[in-house]
Image (spheres, rainbow, N blue to C red):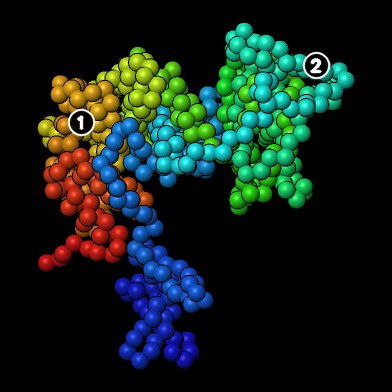
Amino acid sequence: MTGNDIECLINGEYSVACRRDRDEVYMPFSFIHKYFEVYGKITTTDGEEKFEWSHSYSKIYHPKKKYDPRGTFTTFENYNVEVRDRVKCISGIEGVPVSMQWEPRGFFYPTQIAQFGLAHYSKNISEPEPRRRIIDDSEKNLQNWIVSKDAYMAREYDSKLQTNVIRFSTSDHATSQVWLKLDISQDFVLSLDLLMTSNSSLTVVLQNKDKRETVYLHYVTSQQLIYAQDEHVYYGMGVSPRWRRVTRDLIIDMQKGWALQDRPKRKSPRTKFKISSLILSGAGSVDNVSVSGSEHMAQFSAAARWLRAHQRPRGGWPIPVRRRIHARLAELKPGWHSAMSQGHAISVLSRAYYRTGDASYLSAAKKALYLLDVPSASGGVKAMWMDKYVWYEEYPTTPPLFVLNGFIYTLLGLYDLHIIEGDNSISLAKKMFDDGMISLKTLLPLFDTGSGSFYDLRHFTLGVSPNIARWDYHATHVNQLYLLAGLDDDPILINTAKRWEGYMQGKRAAHN
């Protein structure tokens, strides 16, 4: 060490090179950041550099009004489920995310599918109406498609859609196709009515604006989920004898193809690419081809339909992968249920019923209540604290864990159903919500660390080291409590929310 350098001995265990200025000692922030889990960065404002320090990397969203189940779901308008690394892709057949959270081959995770739906429902409310451009509807908007010599295309009346549509067929030759040249920037959500026979495809060509890169998105009549090789990305769309409305976010589809090949993420691809053409091969029909900035309700509807179609007789959505929570707990075997999945699904289905009036959605939401009243040991998700207070378990282990955020999300699902089905004082959803709120307000102090919150109560039930919530989960707890405080005036909710928000600013509980 030289000059004003000084060795700092940390708890008698190891040393850090520091700087001394008279009686003051300065430690490198790189050490403080890791040791105390705080965050900082150098910023520049009006040419002046500053160092910004923060105790948390997460944000609190204070509710602007009372929570309404017909409106946005908590803060989900800020969620982008499909861009998450643990989302393998959006299924071409189902139109919902495929998760890699605990299984790299991919599976349908009901919690993630419901979050996808709730995020798009919320964005539809919070965002302005998107730009939409009709490319070809075979009625008023007609394009000049290029048809190769050995291909066929005609505009014919379809009795199912009761309108003219594009019929096409091509030969097996690679150059046989029906092709449309385009030059569309900014908007990358493609929507169309589609009917294709086997061995047919729709290809969307994306081109970098500097023309140095071309990506081919192939939507093919295959059961294969996703496949990518070089600049070609393939999505299996299945084969259906019926018309279907297809909505694809082309940039997301391109990025998932890149991720499959371990290519690095790109910055702002929506500003750097354009749609340069559509190519039809095989045989089939298309109609109402359009592009837009977003189609949130179409994506919400895909999630609602998936949940309705895949609900099991006992009202649940089994999770088809193993989950190991802790070494002292038996693993959850494929087919386990989650209260968070049940609660989120109820929130989706309740909103689907509100928007459509389709009673099948309300029926599915009510059916989802059943497993919340079945003990975990019997295949449900219900646990009891001290044989008195009910808890809806995100991970139904024995003994239970009492995960906080998943429990509150389940309560919100119950509240959503109760409000949307009508103010019925004897509603099962209302009773289950009220029982859960009593449990929450009773057990809430047990989740307080004095400087943060616990993710669960395993230190009570398993007698192991506490599981402290990382800042993003802690922020979720705070956001959830602020929301519930608008529904219940018990001061424990608002006081805990304020205290826990203070922890994110470096405040701590008093000591003796």
In the rendered image, the vertical position of residue 124 relative to residue 241, given as above or below? below
Q: Is residue 279 left or right of residue 327?
A: right
Q: Name which quarter of the figure residue 499 lies in.
A: bottom left
Q: Is residue 206 left or right of residue 512?
A: right
User: Dot 1 lies on which element?
Assistant: helix
Q: Are marks 1 and 2 in contact (CB under 8 Å)?
A: no
Give the numbered dot on residue 152: 2
Q: Residue at x 41, y 31 (%)?
A: 114
Packing grade of label 1 (10 A; few <14, some 14-19, many >=20) is many
152 or 364: which is nearer to us? 152
Q: Name which quarter of the figure residue 12 lies in.
A: bottom left
Q: Residue at x 73, y 16 (%)?
A: 155
Residue type at tag 1: Phe
Residue type at tag 2: Tyr
Q: Is residue 305 visible?
A: yes
> In the rendered image, which residue does mark 1 sit on?
433
